[in-house]
Amino acid sequence: MILRLSNRACVLSGSARLKSTLSTCFDEMGKAGIILKSASTGIFENLALEDWIHDHVDLQNRSILLLWRNSPVVVIGRHQNPWQECNLPMLRRLGIPLARRRSGGGTVFHDFGNINMTFFTSKKKYDRHRNLKVVTSALKALKPDLDVTATDRFDILLNGHYKISGTAAKLGRTSAYHHCTLLCSVDRSVLSSVLKSNTSEVIRSNATPSVPSPVKNLSDVDPTLDSDTIMEAIASQYNNEFGFDSQVITVDPAHEALMPGIHKMSKDIQMWEWIYGKTPKFSVCASLVVDDVNVKLDMDIKSGIVEQCAVEIPEDWLPPETVNEFTSTLNGSKYCPNEAAVLLAAFVRTRSMSAGVAGKIQRLCEGVLSVM
């Protein structure tokens, strides 16, 4: 079944009655359980779809399972520090976006070999154990001898050791959602590379840290366990577990008329102020070596903005007044390599200094940018 737009109205195939939004389409269906599959593979559209359903659909007497996949992306939890969780320079080189979701939990890597599942319920019916039972039962239905178990941390382990699924959740006043991943055939070399921070040792933070775990793909155990097969099995098991009879409905989160306000929701979570600016306050304490000179860098970052920057350098290498001007240039700026590079380039260009001092400043800039 496909949910699409026609004449700016919501049309459910097989139904002659028209409604204006996704929520009213669900009301028209009158089902206690609904299974959706996103037509998008864009992380920001899919995260916005989750939040739109949570905010706009009556979940007091209705449960929804949303199945979705993304093109390559790293997703951090709401209360995490991206500089601490992933290799940002590598993400930029590979062209892989970073997203911050509205739920808690740890950092994950998605690509087309990963399935995402979101279980929407009323807050009263929120039950992560039962949701994970849907996943493990679906996998065992496909391969009865598969050793998959849910843990007390709401992970799913393969063979009692390898993590194949992690969990996060958002609990609202009356509604909730629980979402989890499932590693089917993820590119593990990219996963391990981008989830290894290049700056975690110089950061002091109270942000929620991820808990590293050994991982494995289901396809490593059985190549027939591909994403499409597993999603079909999960949808079937969801119906069985909860006594529903829903078909899988494909929904496109790009349709503003179907979900009024979703474009703004998607745009909001793409903003630098959300992805980086929502990072809990942290400090950077780094020891750099520039021209065989030891440099101590200290910065305090709040809401992604440099509150205070201090650099300790031998006075015979750079004059103190030059160092003070250098650090003042960064105060109040985004903790962002692009913005810092522009500011520091302007600093060098607009000051009267010898070529030797300008060269030292340039190399010092490179050291500072390396921790961003």
Image (cartoon, rainbow, N blue to C red):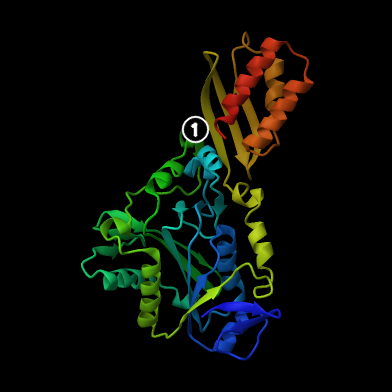
Q: Residue furthest top?
A: 316
Whether residue 245 is visible to the viewer of this picture, yes or no, is: yes
Is residue 236 shown left or right of residue 104? left
Q: Residue furthest left?
A: 145
Q: Residue at x 45, y 83 (%)?
A: 246
Disc 1: CA contacts within 10 A as few (<14), some (14-19) or many (>=20): some
**Labels in figure, total:** 1
Whether residue 319 is visible to the viewer of this picture, yes or no, is: no
State the residue position of label 1: 202
Is residue 256 shown left or right of residue 210? right
Is residue 8 shown left or right of residue 171? right
* Residue kind at label 1, given as amino acid type: Val
Image quarter (top left, top right, bottom left or bottom right) of the C terminus = top right
Q: Relative to 306, does residue 185 appear above or below in the rendering? A: below
Q: Residue at x 57, y 25 (%)?
A: 367
Where residue 106 appears, as percent x and y from the top left, is 45, 53
Is residue 345 shown left or right of residue 233? right
Q: Relative to 206, does residue 201 appear above or below in the rendering? A: above
Where residue 299 appears, as percent x and y from the top left, is 60, 32
Q: Residue at x 67, y 26 (%)?
A: 327
Where residue 23 appears, as percent x and y from the top left, is 61, 80
